[in-house]
């Protein structure tokens, strides 16, 4: 058994997945400043063992994601290496290890990729890679051909007078095509950029979020159970707020609830934590063991 907090004190992100194909959910844990990702395999009784760790970037890594690049059923991994303007794709071997084969995708010089997400942007049933380029002020999408190859990134520009900080993928207008929600440094609005279904993004719509600025990550889910995706985000005023979507490109601002933790050392996630079918929100202080779960009553 392993204590994640004691063994891995610099956690910036954690993702759940079955890395060794034993039908038990394992953990991938990122240590931000060392560029290291640790794979913890589950015993199946709620405990884990350290199985694999690797420093994927020579300098700090800011984000990573899981992806099925091909049809081998093994989970693969995408890691952002911001300082060298690169994204590493590491292919899993079904044993929870990621060092045998790799592929490097390059963003433009000085683009400083900051966040990564995966979705099928061209509707061919293969997951593609989206990268939020902070200094490049754009979103780059690498199209996957299903044979461990990606095309050069298709670039769609964000708002030029601002530097993007977080993004999230979702179908916000119910056309079955992935769209992107983007927040910016020192800004009190979120852009929703709608996808064309070919790897490029089109027109954006700005949605005001009040006087305070966004500092925490964006979360996307159907929080009011109306069948349409909503956008959640943290505020410097220590609240979680929502943009409630109507499925027709329109959003209404709603303050959800106050939180104890916000800023760089806070993490917010979603899940149905009490099994009632509604999406709940968890707020975690990454600098301690404290966490709050907010149960959604859908009223």
Image (cartoon, rainbow, N blue to C red):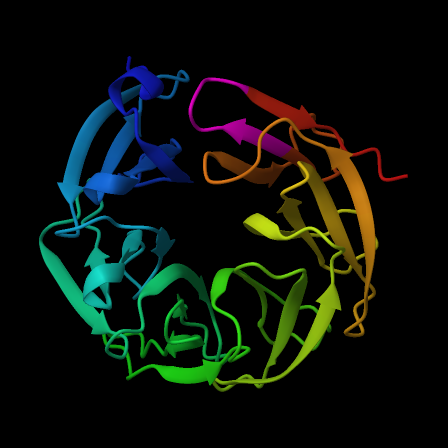
Instruction: Residue 210 in the image: state x and y as whole percent.
Output: 76, 55
What residue lies at 47% left-to-right and 72% top-to-bottom? 120
Q: Is residue 29 magenta?
A: no
Q: Quadrant of the C terminus?
A: top right
Q: Position of residue 1 (x, y in %)?
A: 28, 12
| Residue found 20% across the figure and 40% down from its top | 34
Q: Is residue 52 above or below residue 243?
A: above
**Residue 66, x across and y down, in percent:** 36, 53
Horizontal arrangement in the rendering, residue 235 relative to residue 51 (left or right): right
User: Can see residue 27?
Assistant: no
In which quadrant of the rendered view does residue 141 lie? bottom left
Q: Farthest residue toward the right?
A: 299
Q: Is residue 3 left or right of residue 121?
A: left
Which residue range is magenta in the image?
282-290
Residue 142's x, y, as percent?
35, 76
Above or below for 154 versus 2: below
Q: Is residue 294 visible?
A: yes
Number of marks? 0
Eyeballing the image, is 204 above or below 117?
below
Q: Nearer the viewer, residue 67 or 18?
A: 67
């Amino acid at each position: 058994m392993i204590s994640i907090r004691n063994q891995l004190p610099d956690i910036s992100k954690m993702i759940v997945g079955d890395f060794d194909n034993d039908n038990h959910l394992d953990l991938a844990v990122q240590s931000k400043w060392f560029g290291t990702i640790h794979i913890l395999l589950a015993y199946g009784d709620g405990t884990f063992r350290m199985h694999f760790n690797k420093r994927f970037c020579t300098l700090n890594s800011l984000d990573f994601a899981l992806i099925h690049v091909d049809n081998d059923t093994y989970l693969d991994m995408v890691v952002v290496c911001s300082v060298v303007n690169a994204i590493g794709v590491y292919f899993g071997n079904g044993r929870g290890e990621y060092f045998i084969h790799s592929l490097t995708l390059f963003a433009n010089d000085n683009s400083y990729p900051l966040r990564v997400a995966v979705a099928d942007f061209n509707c061919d049933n293969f997951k593609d890679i989206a990268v939020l380029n902070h200094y490049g002020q754009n979103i780059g999408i690498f199209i996957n051909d299903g044979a461990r190859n990606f095309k050069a990134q298709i670039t769609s520009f964000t708002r030029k007078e601002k530097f993007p900080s977080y993004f999230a993928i979702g179908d916000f207008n119910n056309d079955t095509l992935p769209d992107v929600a983007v927040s910016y440094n020192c800004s009190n609005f979120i852009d929703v950029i709608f996808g064309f279904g070919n790897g490029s993004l089109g027109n954006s719509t700005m949605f005001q979020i009040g006087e305070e600025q966004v500092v925490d990550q964006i979360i996307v889910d159907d929080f009011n159970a109306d069948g349409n995706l909503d956008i959640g985000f943290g505020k410097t005023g220590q609240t979680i707020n929502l943009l409630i979507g109507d499925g027709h490109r329109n959003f209404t601002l709603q303050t959800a609830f106050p939180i104890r933790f916000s800023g760089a050392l806070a993490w917010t996630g979603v899940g149905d934590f009490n099994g009632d079918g509604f999406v709940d929100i968890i707020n975690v202080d990454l600098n301690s063991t404290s966490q709050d779960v907010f149960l959604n009553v859908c009223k």
